[in-house]
Image: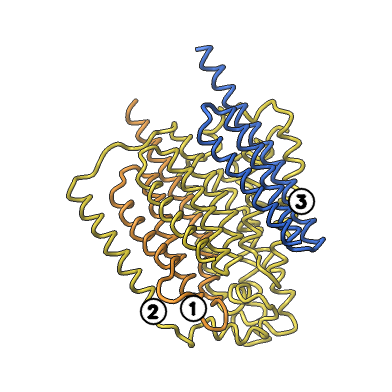
Amino acid sequence: MMAGLDVYALAAAALIGLGFFGLIVQMHPLKRLLAVNVLGNGVFLALIVIARRLPGGPDPVPHAMVLTGIVIAVSATAFGLALVRRQARDEEGDDE
Amino acid sequence: MTLPGVALLLTGLLFYLAGTVGLLRFPDVYSRLHAITKADNVGLGLLCLGIALLSSSWGIAALLALVWLLAIGAATVGCHLIARHSLLERQRGRRE
Amino acid sequence: MIVVDTLAALILVVLAWRCLLLTDLFRSIVLFIVFGLLMALAWARLDAPDLALAEAAIGAGLLGVLLLGTWRAMGSPDGDHRQPGRALQVIAAGGGMVLAVLVGIALHQLPVSEQAAGALALERLDEAATQQPVTAVLLNFRSYDTLLEMGVLLMALLGTWLARVPLMESLSGDDASRGTELLPVALRVFVPVMLLVGAYLIWAGTHSPGGAFQGGAVLAAAGVLLALAGRLRGDTGDSLPLRMLLVLGLTVFSLAGLLLIPLQGAFMAYPPTLIYPVMLIVEYSLAVSIAITLVLLYTGSRGLRRGPA
């Protein structure tokens, strides 16, 4: 652990900010899903940065949470992608 | 074993650098694939060899050899499929 | 090593920045895949090998295939050039920056607590019959969480089924993978290796980094590879065996918790003599369910059938 600044903590903060910005500014649904994922990864990174500070070794509880979180995030994204495809198909149907 | 190991690592990195420059500078899909698969496979091989020397353990060396073989196999198939896709696209474009 | 960490953190942020602000959708997705790979590297640097394993299989592998597949199923759109209003952009940029600064300050000023749940978990590791703290937390100390997360995974799959837009039907026009001699050979080499690695990772979870989530992800990747090569196809019909495998993890986990109540007097408390076999059985059933759920989330279909060899 270095004194003062923790680069991964800074990266986590930047990812959260970027994800938030992208989520609001982007119009394309796929881009919004990417933004949510970046935001999520920022949160995961923050949790692991906190876990590293436990004196007796990395705290396993945040590790377990992030591990399940990664799997849940991919399943939620898959669901989101299915909704995006459905929207695209319905819009196609309207055009014809 | 430290000196030859480090020398191998540095040479491996040089090959990676060459491959990346090729990927960025070459004009079309085929020459880019050529650059990245050839240079990176050799680079990875040198890295694995270097790490095996540094670890000075036969078990780790065997595992690294396996990693290298699998990576070469994956690179070969990936390269083949990308090149094939690109070729088929071009033929289709010519026919139309 | 501080240089490596600083570089990794910097590249992560730059990749996320480029990924979110490029108008070219394809490049955004590719950058996101690279971002996932770099996250795996960051996890390895942050003493989290479990997360590195899961991220490499899921964040960089499965998620990338899903995103690219959807991108192609939508007719390869090149992104949306509509811009939100100027005011909204300014507010979003300001909000994002304030959020980032606040999170940064909070992360640096957070006091280190000796009373963290993890300290307790590390202290009582012997009671979990495993020396791998993450596995102990997942399957023993906080098994309720894991059980409910399996439920969430299943809910996402149900949602995907309800949307009724299977990915595999819309991806039929790919002839690059057809008629090549190399692909069947590659499948014969890689699929058994991936299955072996997946099964090993699940077992390894009892004593070293690995476990149901990482192993399940590798098994799912093998399934997705078969689906990409056309060997596995989505099927519209329901199949009872497949559904049973989907709920296998939840069922075994809950049953193990319920059946052992008479012995220990509490839900999901395992007697010390049975803890290792119970954990192993639960891990393998969870991994099978996770793998099949992830493959079906990719195909988006109700069932699976064998494709032409």
Q: CA distance from mark 1 to mark 2?
A: 10 Å
For chain B, the rendered hue is blue
Question: Which residue occupies the foreground of this view, C230 or C255?
Answer: C230
In the image, are marks 2 and 3 on the same chain? no
Asked whether the residues under the numbered discs 1 and 2 touch, taking CB atoms below 8 Å apart as contact, a structural biologist would say yes
Rendering coords of residue C86 (x, y %): 18, 46
Residue at left 65%, top 54%?
C218
Which residue in the protein does label 2 denote?
C110
In the image, are marks 1 and 3 on the same chain? no
Q: Amino acid at mark 2?
A: Leu
| Disc 1 chain ID | A
Q: Amino acid at mark 3?
A: Leu
Residue at left 72%, top 48%?
B68
* Residue A53 numbered tag: 1
10 Å crowding of disc 1: few (<14), some (14-19), many (20+): some
The chain letter of the yellow chain reads C
Quadrant, the C terminus of chain A: top left
Residue at left 70%, top 32%?
C308
Q: CA distance from mark 2 to mark 3?
A: 44 Å
For chain A, the rendered hue is orange
Q: CA distance from mark 1 to mark 3?
A: 36 Å
Question: Which residue occupies the foreground of this view, A29 or C164?
Answer: A29
